Image (cartoon, grey):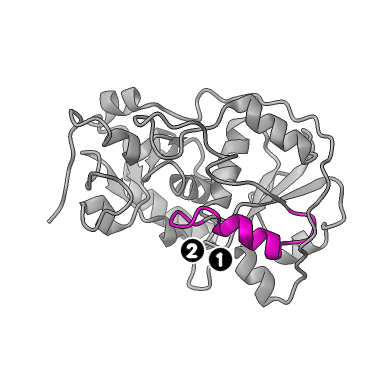
């Protein structure tokens, strides 16, 4: 049975299970080596490290956003070196509420791998429960992951340009309310949002303790957000296609599948001064 979310207790029971592969995807947008250094200092035993910029993103050309999708076969090679097979249960974790783990979750689903989950509560809950850490680097393993990209999993900037005024399509922006409004922008050169987009800050998917809200609560909130549109008519974006995956993950937890990712997101949209920008006072 497909699992989107696993508890620390469930993961601890499978640390020696060759059918499970764990990935540490800790990252800091302001300190690009922080996640790797933290991983080297201590991680969940057996976990492999994937870097957001180096492994989970592709080459930037100045117009395709800050975290464009990676070249598929390069990522597949990396996953194979970590022992991923079509039957492997993959678990991703970070220390940031799952925002980077959800990126890997979405990417594997995009490439046709259904057995992928996020660790609920991430590393903070794992440590709070007194579970082990290790500084040993796991050996390379032999996998046979074969990507089967889902062409309907994402949209490009041209799709957003064509459909952003269509009342049937909901464009959901996962950034903070201030960044969405155009206030205090620090990551991108232009502040604001795509005209017509609605805002749901990704951290609204979490409880106060950092764990995900229960499915029924997420379902009520997300249905209210989408209004008359169904989940398949939603396109999710953020600053660079990372935290948008958190909202897509929440939709899956809520039983509202089918939404698509706009990978380039705001950092791609605002790179062209001819595209319209909305701001709020």
Q: Secondary structure at mark 1?
A: loop
Magenta stretch holds residue 32: yes
Q: Is residue 112 visible?
A: no
Looking at the image, residue 230 lies above or below residue 26: above
Callout 2 crowding tier (Cα within 10 Å): few <14, some 14–19, many ≥20? some
Residue at 66 percent of width and 59 percent of height: 39
- Indicate the position of residue 157 as horizontal and vertical percent values: 34, 27
Residue at 82 percent of width and 57 percent of height: 14
Quarter of the image that includes the N terminus: top right
Residue closer to the observer: 54 or 206: 54
Residue at 64 percent of width and 46 percent of height: 50
Q: Which mark is residue 206?
A: 2
Disc on the earlier residue, 1 or 2: 2
- Indicate the position of residue 187 as horizontal and vertical percent values: 33, 50
Magenta stretch holds residue 35: yes
Residue at 71 percent of width and 41 percent of height: 115
Contact flag, marks 1 and 2 (Cβ < 8 Å): yes
Is most of the magenta stretch helix, strand or loop?
Answer: loop
- Relative horizontal placement of residue 212, taking residue 67 as reference (left or right): right
Residue at mark 1 to residue at mark 2: CA–CA distance: 5 Å
- Indicate the position of residue 17 as horizontal and vertical percent values: 86, 52
Q: Secondary structure at mark 2?
A: loop
Callout 1 crowding tier (Cα within 10 Å): few <14, some 14–19, many ≥20? some
Residue closer to the observer: 87 or 132: 132
**Residue under label 1:** 211
Q: Which residues are magenta?
A: 28-47
- Relative horizontal placement of residue 72, taking residue 206 as reference (left or right): right
Looking at the image, residue 241 lies above or below residue 130: above
Residue closer to the observer: 141 or 151: 141
């Amino acid at each position: 049975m497909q699992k989107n979310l696993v508890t620390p207790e469930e993961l601890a029971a499978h640390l020696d299970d060759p059918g499970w592969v764990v990935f540490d995807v800790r990252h800091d947008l302001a300190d690009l080596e922080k996640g790797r250094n933290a991983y080297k200092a201590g991680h969940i035993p057996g976990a492999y490290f994937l870097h957001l910029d180096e492994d989970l993103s592709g080459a930037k050309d100045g117009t395709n956003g800050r975290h464009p999708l990676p070249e598929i076969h390069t990522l597949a090679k990396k996953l194979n070196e970590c022992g991923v097979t079509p039957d492997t249960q993959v678990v991703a974790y970070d220390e940031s509420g799952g925002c980077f783990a959800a990126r890997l979750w979405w990417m594997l689903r995009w490439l046709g791998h259904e057995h992928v989950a996020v660790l609920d509560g991430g590393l903070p809950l794992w440590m709070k429960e007194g579970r082990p850490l290790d500084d040993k680097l796991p050996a390379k393993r032999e996998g046979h992951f074969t990507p089967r990209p889902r062409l309907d999993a994402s949209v490009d900037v041209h799709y957003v340009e064509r459909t952003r005024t269509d009342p049937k399509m909901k464009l959901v922006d996962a950034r903070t309310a201030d960044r969405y409004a155009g206030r205090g922008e620090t990551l991108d050169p232009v502040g604001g949002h795509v005209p017509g987009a609605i805002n749901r800050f990704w951290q609204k998917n979490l409880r106060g303790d950092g764990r995900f809200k229960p499915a029924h609560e997420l379902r009520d909130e997300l249905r209210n957000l989408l209004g008359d549109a169904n989940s398949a008519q939603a396109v999710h974006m953020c600053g660079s296609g990372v935290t948008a995956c958190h909202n897509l993950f929440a939709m899956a937890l809520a039983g509202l599948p089918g939404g698509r990712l706009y990978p380039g997101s705001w950092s791609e949209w605002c790179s062209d001064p001819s595209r319209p920008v909305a701001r709020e006072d």
